[in-house]
Image (cartoon, rainbow, N blue to C red):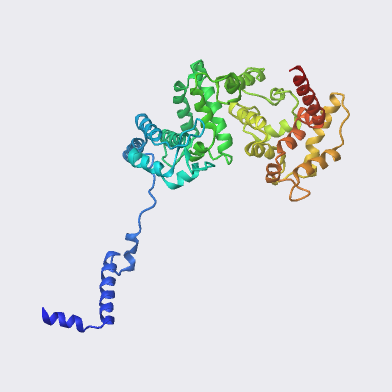
């Protein structure tokens, strides 16, 4: 042993480093699978798993079961009602003075203490990042207990909803097809007290009405599927679940697309337009929509571009039409309407296109005994409103970015919309007079 010790001591530092490098290279090469480069693919982790074919029933069943187990595990990781109540109790117990009105506050030190006592499930909520998000203008560097608790509740709700939607994701790819979302809403109906009065015979029409709003706004490329993430990020699900409130006001119901009165209104309009009761709408029947002032040129384009059956429109296509006209300020609606204006499918509309559509407005004005307005004046006003990048062409981004796309479209397709624009100063003055009168009365 003494001789060996002396031998090691006599080696230079360079020799020791060389031996260390050789040993490291040897063990690292073995760990990587040897020096044979042809076998290196074996060390690459698998990142693609082919979906089972339709006839591979066993693999499909295995995939479904594994997803169900995974979602159940994720569900168990969420806070239940008892754990949420315990969290609220701990937050309330650790509030710190001074009192800020009626709002209980907590500082960062107490916040961390609550995090340690709240349990493993709550740990992800008690981070410096979350605290910083909720820190506003308190002079003592505290956050509102109620705001933090609402944040936790919102996160829990989002995860619960994501798990609930994922149960309907048959493909397991993170998106819902139209049939998947229809099944989700159909099974949701019994849990919404505001829909208790709906007859079961109307369920299919209600589901179709509800699903169309999701797909019209969240699937602009018409792929037939929507990401679950997009469903969670938009406000539509909030509007739908608002129907759990048994005391929802009449105004809220009328403004909520998913409410029973709103769905019945849209379907009732469709039935009233369908004069021959064949379940479909012809161009002549659709011309009576709203104030019956949509131009025939615009309606021609609707039936040229939209899906029809023997020249007639079904309820689903009608819903897209209604959603576009009732939400003209929204980019998805402007995209729908711009496609109808862009007759040559060039990606822009020019002076010729504007003139083509506005001539129909001028003809309607003659029919109603009004003096037609000069197209040149209207054309100049449209370009002044839009301010396109190209002074001779208006693109969809131009129409969306100018924030007056709804006005431009209304001027071109609807006599009532054009009349409203032309008389905007008179209408504003009348509104102001009305408000003044109300103030005088009080």
The reply to whether residue 60 is in sight is no
Please tell me which residue lies in front, 267 or 311: 267
Please tell me which residue lies in front, 274 or 393: 393
The reply to whether residue 390 is in sight is yes
Residue 176: percent from left, percent from top: 47, 36
Residue 19 left/right relative to 291: left
The quadrant of the picture occupied by the C terminus is top right
Please tell me which residue lies in front, 61 or 93: 93
From what the image shows, is residue 362 above or below residue 439?
Answer: below
**Residue at coordinates 35% horizontally, 56% vertically from top-left?**
45
Please tell me which residue lies in front, 404 or 274: 404
Residue 404: percent from left, percent from top: 72, 38
Residue furthest left in the image:
1
**Residue at coordinates 28% horizontally, 78% vertically from top-left?**
18
Residue 32: percent from left, percent from top: 30, 64
Q: Quadrant of residue 304?
A: top right
Q: Quadrant of residue 436?
A: top right
Residue 139: percent from left, percent from top: 52, 43
Q: Quadrant of residue 92?
A: top left
* Count of picture labels: 0
Residue furthest right in the image:
371
The quadrant of the picture occupied by the N terminus is bottom left
Residue furthest front in the image:
98
Residue 230 left/right relative to 386: left
From what the image shows, is residue 97 above or below residue 398?
Answer: above
């Amino acid at each position: 042993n003494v001789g060996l010790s002396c031998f090691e001591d006599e080696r230079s530092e360079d020799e020791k480093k060389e031996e260390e490098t050789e040993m490291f290279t040897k063990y690292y090469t073995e760990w990587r699978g040897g020096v044979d480069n042809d076998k290196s693919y074996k060390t690459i982790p698998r990142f693609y798993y082919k979906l089972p074919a339709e006839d591979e029933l066993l693999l499909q069943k295995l995939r479904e079961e594994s997803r169900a187990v995974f979602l159940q595990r994720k569900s168990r990781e969420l806070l239940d009602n008892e754990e949420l109540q315990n969290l609220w109790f701990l937050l309330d117990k650790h509030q710190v003075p001074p009192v800020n009105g009626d709002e209980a506050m907590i500082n960062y030190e107490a916040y961390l203490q609550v995090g340690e006592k709240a349990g493993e499930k709550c740990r992800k909520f008690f981070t410096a990042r979350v605290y910083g998000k909720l820190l506003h203008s308190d002079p003592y560097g505290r956050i509102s207990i109620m705001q933090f608790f609402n944040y936790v509740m919102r996160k829990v709700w989002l995860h619960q909803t994501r798990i609930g939607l994922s149960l309907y994701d048959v493909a397991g790819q993170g998106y819902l097809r139209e049939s998947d979302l229809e099944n989700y809403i159909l099974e949701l109906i019994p849990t919404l007290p505001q829909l208790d009065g709906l007859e079961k015979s109307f369920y299919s029409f209600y589901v179709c009405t509800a699903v169309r709003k999701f797909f019209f706004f969240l699937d602009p490329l018409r792929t037939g599927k929507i990401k679950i993430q997009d469903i969670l990020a938009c406000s539509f699900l909030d509007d739908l679940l608002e129907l759990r409130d048994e005391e929802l006001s009449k105004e809220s119901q009328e403004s909520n697309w998913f409410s029973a009165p709103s769905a019945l209104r849209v379907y009732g309009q469709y039935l009233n337009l369908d004069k021959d009761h064949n379940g479909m709408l012809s161009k002549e029947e659709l011309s009576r929509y709203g104030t019956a002032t949509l131009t025939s040129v615009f309606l021609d384009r609707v039936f040229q571009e939209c899906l029809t059956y023997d020249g007639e429109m079904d309820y689903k296509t009608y819903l897209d039409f209604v959603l576009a006209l009732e939400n003209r300020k929204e980019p998805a609606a402007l995209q729908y309407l711009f496609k109808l204006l862009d007759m040559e499918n060039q990606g822009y509309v020019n002076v010729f296109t504007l003139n083509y559509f506005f001539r129909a407005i001028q003809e309607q004005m003659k029919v109603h005994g009004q003096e037609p307005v000069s197209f040149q004046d209207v054309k100049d006003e449209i370009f002044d409103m839009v301010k396109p990048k190209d002074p001779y062409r208006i693109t969809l981004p131009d129409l969306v970015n100018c924030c007056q796309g709804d006005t431009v479209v209304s001027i071109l397709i609807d006599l009532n919309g054009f009349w409203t624009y032309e008389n905007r100063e008179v209408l504003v003055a009348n509104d102001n007079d009305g408000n003044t009168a109300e103030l005088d009365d009080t």
